[in-house]
Amino acid sequence: MHYDLILKNGICIFPWGEEKASIGIKNGRILSLTVGTHDEADQVIDAQGLHVLPGLMDCHVHFREPGNALVETIETGTKAAALGGLTTVFDMPNTNPATADLETVQWKQKRASETSWINFGFYIGATRENTKDLASLESQQGVCGIKVYAGSSTGSLMVEDDASLEQVMLRGHRRVCYHAEDEYRLQERKKLFCEGMPYENHSKWRDEECAFLGTRRIIALARKTGRPAHILHTTTQEELEWLVDHKDIATVEVLANHLTQIGPECYERLGGFAVMNPPIRDQRHYDACWEAIRNGVVDVVSSDHAPHDPTLKAKPWLCCPSGMLGVQTIVPLMLNHVNEGRLSLSRLADVMAANPARIYGMPTKGRIQVGYDADFTLVDMGKQRRITNDWIASPAGWTPYDQVKVKGWPMVTIVKGCVVMQNDEMLGTPKGQLVNFLP
């Protein structure tokens, strides 16, 4: 048999377990898991000593396009993702203009097709003005779902009251993704704080009840309307324990930041560069996030990559924007967590490949299986590296993990059978693959 690409001798993370195998790829799909010694290919990669994972995904990034090319674009963001071992990303709608109408959707489709290095999907932002159009917008090519900002946004992307949220849920049928902080409590508590206070006050202002109240309200409306909910960047012990009883209607995302950073230490060390929404919390909530990884309550781990100009991040608290870079560092960080015993490689493939494919409706992604897309992340679990700012591909040029040592590193990124990154080098040109989702 002649293939386009053969991956041989890798330790593969299959749905049924971990075993050594040689994979045959043709026309962007997995054709065989039992390639023989007499089979040939246009390209052969010897993965001896490497683990072969189904292509890892980051379902929560902000690439700022259209908007601010000085901090990120689809081209630079997907390049960073590929360097970090990711094969698929989903981009958020709080761009300028917001991705909330057909014209912007079509612009983003064209731009991604021209400049994305990897598989690309994007969210539609729900507004009061576009509610009636959400069912048709969610069916457009490349659209992974609807994003609702029930708290912590600006302009028309804020939908904070129950009546408007219910109307959003009644349009369409796919899972809706929520920033679930309660806006009313946020605005009331903001009066207790002032500019220039210590950065650790970010977690006191946006406290546990802001998050828990927002999540309870969303789930109540999900039950009322029958529309499944995906709670993004869950951060608190209270939410995670409560969501155990609501897994029939809700799926759960936790961020790599909340699995890696702990307050108040991170605020003392990083200042404004640790400020994000929802905030980094203390040890109790960090431990709860990891317990939810272990017991299966967490479905997805993402980065919430949100680049900003570093001069703005250095401003005093309440003046500095919220958000950290993360799309390039999430895989090394999570591999390091695997090496430190916090989760297995199989569980990592679960929360960054199989579950995203299930939740968002990608029937040929998320597993190493015959007939599936040939998306792979090849990693060296023994390789030790130091994350540095000068490795970051984003024009913003910084990471909260500068100088952090990790064990485990992405070595090869393969998208639809094409080798996009190998040994820290980008290969070829952007392929511009929009993800196909179930209707």
Image: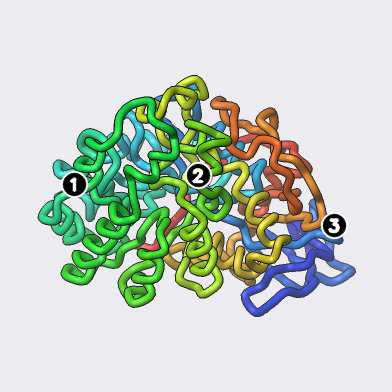
Q: Relative to residue 165, is residue 318 depicted above or below?
A: above
Q: Is residue 27 visible?
A: no
Left or right, 29 with respect to 89, comes to right
- Who's the residue at 48% across and 31% down the image? 272
Q: Secondary structure at mark 1?
A: helix
Residue 422, image quadrant: top right
Q: Please report whichever mark, 2 or 1, sits nearer to the chain's N-terminal start.
A: 1
- The answer to whether residue 328 of the structure is visible from this angle is yes
The residue wearing badge 3 is 46
Give the residue type that dot 2 points to.
Pro
Q: Left or right? Give the position of 156 relative to 200.
A: left
Q: Residue at x 61, y 57 (%)?
A: 55
Q: CA distance from mark 2 to mark 3?
A: 45 Å
Mark 2 = which residue?
Answer: 264
Q: Nearer the viewer, mark 2 or mark 1?
A: 2
Q: Earlier in the sequence, mark 2 or mark 3?
A: 3
Query: Which marked residue is nearer to the observer: mark 1 or mark 3?
Result: 1
Q: Residue at x 33, y 50 (%)?
A: 207
